[in-house]
Amino acid sequence: MSETKRDIGVVGLGTMGRNLARNLARGGYAVAGFDPDEAARESLRTSEPDHDFATPESLEGMVAVLERPRRILVMVPAGPIVDSVLGELEPLMDPGDVVIDGGNSLWHDTERREKAARDYHFMGMGVSGGAEGALVGPSMMPGGPKEGYERLRPLLESMAATSEHGHCVTWCGKGPAGHFVKMTHNGIEYGIMQILAEAVLLLRRGLGMSAAEAADVVAEWNAGDLGGFLTEITADILRVKDPQDPSRALLDQVLDTAGQKGTGRWTVLAAVELGVPIPTIAAAVDARALSSFGDVRRALATGDRREIPLSTEALRDAVFASALASYAQGFDLLKGADDEHHWSIDRVEVARIWTGGCIIRAKVLDRLMEVLGEAAGPLLAPGLASDFDARLEGWRKTVGAAASAGHLVPAMAASLTWWEQLSTGVGTARVIQAQRDRFGHHTFRRVDAPDVAAHDDWEP
Ligand code: 6PG
């Protein structure tokens, strides 16, 4: 079969690239794969007994066996390696060929690369679902030239997860929209992970539960409104025993320092640049950063905090509302980006493709699809007012009780404050305006004449 032209080439046969190549082959597509490492090529060749992969020894060799116009999926680590692969591909490409970068690239890089790709379509695509998802069905977020998407569409649809809302792939918008959407997905992911981590801490320390008891509570949440992949794995994680001493939970032996590859930080940077508040996500990014302040934390540690009077129902409501805040802020960020860059991001479609395959898949996305369909205003939150208000009592109780006993709830507290600020008619801004006018003559607006700039010397 070596002379048969291949439908698509996959460059980079690490775990993600290999699994996506296998997924494509299982969908009936003829795949060529290239990686400079022979062991990686060999591992693709032997991965699917029923499928034959072409694995030429050079990029030129791979390009030569592709059906024209060519389709190439680049799955190499984000950063300079993408540029070097594109530099090698560039002279081999013809008009109409499509090259899609499926790594976790920074959207600014994708924007630059698309502009530089003269004779072929360059696209950026976020892929979520980890190694397992890549094989059995990820959620995919492609962006860039629509013509390129249409050429890839049948292959992407065959690879993607399916949920009750269809294939978890869509054209996310022009330019770097695909990678921007994936970055935002990861920001939301950071928020929800942190919120669940805070809930585990409160169940264990605040309510004095064992890991197994906490697992039961989180599993019960997963069966209700909080159902979703991250809730599910958190319950599972709590049940795992330490292989070195099965009398204790493995979780309690994990060093308390969180890693991060940077996508959460990129989300916060983008939000600050666009002026869109995403405090839940920012708190989660900061919590990871603070977790690595090992020496300071050791020096200041005052021991575990006290038990608190809190019901698991109140805590569940706080977790739900805070997680909803993480999604709402992510969707607000997508709107802010689209207003600024005009990429044509369809947020209902984004919510739809997150209903399956990706890390933040959850029941609440059904509700978000509804609200986003109706949202004409600048903020998603007003459409969700009843969803937040119904949980407000438990949310306030949880954050208040946690704070009074010194428990860590940075993401839940930031989420609650965000909601309180949005739903408070008159807040702190009038004092800020008076201060600005006092020291800088910046003027202010009177409530009885909001269209006219007013000034006072503010001397009592
Ligand atoms: C996904 C994940 C994936 C990955 C992140 C986590 O959607 O499949 O988000 O992209 O797990 O790289 O990144 P951190 O190392 O920053 O937590």
Image (tube, grey):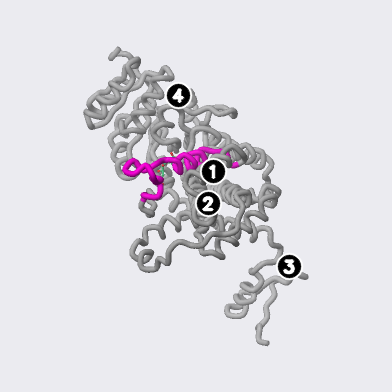
Is 238 within the magenta? yes
Q: How far apart are marks 1 and 4 (CA)?
A: 37 Å
Please report the residue visible at 38 percent of the width from the left and 20 percent of the height from the top: 25
> Compared with residue 379, is residue 362 higher up or lower down, i.e. above or below?
above
* Horizontal side, residue 94 vs residue 233: left or right: left
Of marks 1 and 3, the one in the foreground: 1
- Of mark 4 and mark 2, the one earlier in the sequence is 4
User: Closer to us: mark 3 or mark 4?
Assistant: 4
- Assign a secondary structure to mark 3: strand
Q: How far apart are marks 3 and 2 (CA)?
A: 48 Å
Which residue corresponds to mark 2?
203
Q: From the image, tell me which residue sits under label 4.
A: 155
Among numbered discs 2 and 1, the one appearing first in the sequence:
2
The x, y position of residue 211, in whole percent, is 47, 46
Q: Which mark is residue 450?
A: 3
Q: Is residue 117 left or right of residue 166?
A: left
The answer to whether residue 181 shows anywhere in this view is no
Mark linked to residue 389: none
- Identified by mark 4, the residue type is Leu
Residue extent of the magenta highlight: 226-254
